[in-house]
Amino acid sequence: MEKKNIKIYIISAIILLIVSIYYINNKPLTTVNNTVKKDDQSLEEEETHTSNIIESISYSSKDLKGNEYRIFANSGEIDLVDSDVIYLTEVKAYIILVNKPDIISITSNFGKYNTSNFDTIFSKNVNINYIDNLITGEYMEYSMQNNILIISKNVVYKNLENTLNADVIELDTLTKNTKIYMHNTKNKVRVQSIK
């Protein structure tokens, strides 16, 4: 009888040990996951509550030559990681050159503006107007330091005489020198005469 009781105790201990190990290994993982989910949710809530949204933004800057860059937006949100970066919506910008009577006008749905170096990325429905020229695309970078606009993605260039379709247009804002090209050298820029 004692052997029978010992066997029952050993089997009970093994079953209890297996159940305990199973419970310990599975239950805390679920709790940890729930905690992580709660932390993620509170982090999202925290980000929402600590975001820096500004309405009716405008910035103006001048280079050493006196050329001016003005940018306006309906709203902007300061990047929480890099406070020099502001994400803009409904963007309008103007490049006013000292020695040129023409103003370069830029509009887009979105923008990313760096307040320390004035570099700007425009995206979605980008339109550039200057003199009798209109350039449209989906993405544009402007560097005030380098005086260059680089327009890409579905680029169309129109003036009084021609319509051009290309992958990229680079425009020097001071000299108005323009480079129009395709990413793939096997493809050609399409030119259509309006006259």
Image (cartoon, grey):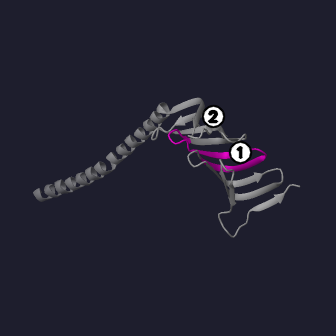
From the image, tell me which residue sits under label 2.
72
Relative horizontal placement of residue 165, taking residue 93 as reference (left or right): right
Query: Magenta residues, as a range?
Result: 113-142
Outermost residue to the bottom: 186
Mark 1 vs 2: CB contact within 8 A? no
Q: Residue 123: image x %, image y %?
A: 63, 46
Outermost residue to the left: 2
The residue nearer to you, when weighing 141 against 76, is: 141
* SS at circle 2: strand
Q: How many numbered circles are shown? A: 2
- Characterize the magenta stretch by its predominant secondary structure: strand
* SS at circle 1: strand
Q: Does the magenta stretch include residue 125?
A: yes
| Relative height, residue 159 to residue 42 (above, below) | below
The residue nearer to you, when weighing 167 against 75, is: 167
* Amino acid type at image mark 1: Asn
From the image, tell me which residue sits under label 1.
127
Please tell me in which quadrant of the rendered image residue 128 appears: top right
User: What residue appears at the point 58 percent right and 33 percent down from the top-left corner?
Assistant: 59
Outermost residue to the top: 55
Q: Residue 18: image x %, image y %?
A: 26, 54
Q: Is residue 108 magenta?
A: no
